Amino acid sequence: MIQLENLHKGYQVDGHIVPALQGIDLSIEKGEIFGVIGHSGAGKSTLIRCINLLERPTSGRVVVDGTDLMNLDDRQLQEQRRQIGMIFQHFNLLSSATVAENVAFPLKLAKRPKAEIEQKVTELLTLVGLEAHRNKYPAQLSGGQKQRVGIARALASDPKVLLCDEATSALDPQTTNSILALLRDINRKLGLTIVLITHEMHVIRAVCDRVAVIDGGKIVEMGNVVDVFLKPQHPTTQEFVEQVADSVELKEIVSHEKADKDRTMIRITFLGSQTYQPVLFQTMLETGTPFNILQGTISRMKDTPYGQLIVELEADQEQVNKTIGSLRQRGLEVEVI
Amino acid sequence: MSITFENVDWAEIWQGSLDTLTMLAFSTLFTAIIGLPLGILLFLTSRGQLLQNKALYAVLSFIVNILRSVPFIILMIMLIPLTRLIVGTSLGVQGSIPPLVIGAAPFFARLVETSLREVDRGVIEAAQSMGASKWQIIWKVLLPESRPGLIAGITITTVALVSYTAMSGAIGGGGLGDLAIRYGYQRFQTDVMIVTVVILLVLVQILQTIGDRLVAYFTRR
């Protein structure tokens, strides 16, 4: 759906050029939710703005749904932008217009007939659950409601792609979850391709299918969320993954326990349906290894449940190897730490 | 000391008030017609905006600054030949309107520029992302979003024009200012002076109140 090829973007600052993007290659499939995570200043904002040419790349290609946007004149670009909805961190609603007028705005820009606009607005406000607030002004709404208006507005022109620029960064955790649930919902209902950028790993974990980690204007790691999340390679990725794990505690436990030789700590990762099966219990029963659970999480990446357990085995090396072998045989991911 | 108002010719005061109101109405109208587009152009051509154009902005800005830095009473005199060219006379209500507009439009244009700058950049960006053309951004985003500021601006400009109309009395512009100068100042008829000042004062109060009400009505923040 979206192809970015060798994208470069530099900003002129005090006479010299500061690079923001340095050779981004990215291909985003139709219907997927693609996340881009990075620290502020990493270039993620520039990257998402390049997809609808709010920022024009210095070089490279931007292809959305088969159209190379860089070759279009102003009018053609305006036409193409209607296929690409966008929502923003600070919502960017028209403060002088009501909720309904805000949602109608892109349709009025496209000069659609009044009756069609009216019907579409009602439909969208129902979708985002704001039908009761249609005549209010943005200043009378909460942050979460404003973002719902933003989403309804972005969907008004039936776009194929929705760009989310830090869409939940100004919201509290509970509201963030409800907005993310809404995004997941419209992705499913409308088959919409969603690209979102964020600096919060839990956002990626909650909704994304694939993720790219951006650092210093380059993509340093990319893949399925499940893989990147469970086996982060790049230091920046590991940092982000630590955001959502209780890794600080874990480090403490590790340093505390290391001294003892007859104890081995392992990290066991469950994925999908394994998460709900008594695999650990069965293995330990079979091998007779005494064990102690030090830490555990069971969570969910979009639709994939997963679990991670830090387990301490109180046994000699041979017994430990046997146990690990048995766990791996059952399809679990095991790592000695 | 008691004031008897014996010198006050109420018919003349009435005529002067009407003249002042006529001058005010037409000069405000033309100031808006010229100042609003000028202000929009100043804003759009400034750095980082939709039609960024260093040269054009510099020229416009220079002209506006010159017109704003010449004291109005001198500007009026300097413009006499131009006024004659435009309306055929430099006297009376008609003759006062061109200098009033030329004096006030640059002032209003700066106020317009300032209120447009207050419009959230993000909202403009959102409109761009929805495929808005530059005209649509001006008409459907910039102007509605800055409406309270624009109304406040035209109110300030109209109040400034009230004092300008009074000044135009000095070179035969007619209106209440003319009466105040001819009777109040040159013939020492303090009562005429007081009456004209009170009327001007009430006029300004009314204008400001209307302006404030409109600003409050259109403010949605």
Image (cartoon, rainbow, N blue to C red):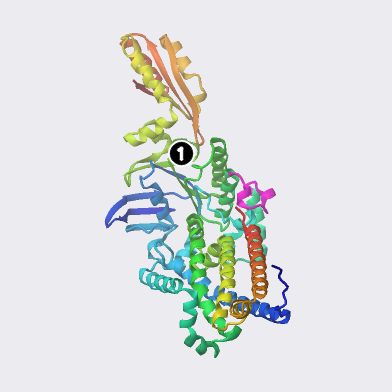
- Please report the residue visible at 66 percent of the width from the left and 62 percent of the height from the top: B209
The quarter in which the N terminus of chain B is drawn is: bottom right
Residue nearest the observer in this picture, B197 or A277: B197
Residue A228 vs A320, above or below: the answer is: below
**Residue topped by disc 1:** A204
Task: Tell whether position A80 is magenta.
Answer: no
Q: Is residue A139 magenta?
A: yes
Write down the chain letter for disc 1.
A
Secondary-structure class at tag 1: helix
Report the front residue among A248 and A278. A248
In the rendered image of this protein, does residue A298 appear above or below residue A15?
Answer: above
Quarter of the view holding residue B95: bottom right
> Which amino acid type is marked by label 1?
Ile
* Above or below A102: residue B45: below
One can see residue A109 in this view: no
Query: Which region of the structure is painted magenta?
Result: A127-142
Count of picture labels: 1
- Where residue A19 sits: x, y (%)? 30, 51
**Residue B213, horizontal then vertical, whole percent:** 66, 60
Asked if residue A1 can be seen in this view, the reply is: yes
Q: Residue furthest front?
A: B1
x and y, in percent, of residue B40 in the image: 49, 68
Dot 1 alpha-carbon crowd within 10 angstroms: few under 14, some 14 to 19, many 20 or more: many
- Location of residue A164 in the rendering, given as x and y in whole percent from the top left corner: 48, 48
Q: Nearer the viewer, residue A280 or B185?
A: B185
Of residues A195 and B15, the one drawn nearer to the viewer in this rendering = B15
